[in-house]
Amino acid sequence: MSEVAPYGPERTRRAYVVAGEALAPVVQSRKGTLAQVPFHQTVVLQNQLLG
């Protein structure tokens, strides 16, 4: 999913991991571009930790 122009210099990706009754938000933000693969890996690892 990509952001529609106009957009600012900062990028933010958000995800939510649900495990039982726990809801864990995962947020990564930085100036410039934000790679999808490291964010995906972070979400997968958080899911494994909560799983």
Image (cartoon, rainbow, N blue to C red):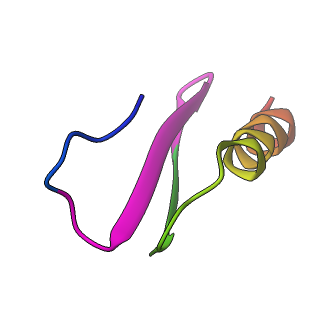
Return the x and y of residue 42 as percentages of the image width and height. 75, 49
Residue furthest front in the image: 5
Q: Position of residue 16 (x, y in %)?
A: 50, 36
Which residue is depicted at the point 75% across and 45% down?
46
Task: Look at the picture and state if 8 lies above or below 48.
Answer: below
Q: Foreground: 25 or 12?
A: 12
The number of numbered discs placed on residues in the rendered structure image is 0
Does 6 sit left or right of 10 as displayed?
A: left
Determine which quarter of the picture holds residue 7.
bottom left
Residue extending farthest top:
20
Q: Residue at x 84, y 43 (%)?
A: 45
Q: What kind of secondary structure does the magenta stretch mostly adopt? A: strand
Quarter of the image with the N terminus in it: top left
User: What is the span of residues highlighted in magenta in the rendered image?
Assistant: 7-24
Query: What is the quadrant of residue 44 in the picture?
Result: top right
Residue 9 at x, y percent in the picture: 32, 74
Q: Is residue 36 left or right of residue 15?
A: right
Q: Could you say which is closer to the camera, residue 39 or residue 32?
A: 32
Residue name at image x 76 percent, y 43 percent:
37
Image quadrant in which the C terminus is located: top right
Counting from the top left corner in percent of width and height, residue 34 is at 57, 59
Residue located 62% across and 22% down the image: 20
Q: Is residue 21 left or right of residue 7?
A: right
Is-magenta flag for residue 28?
no
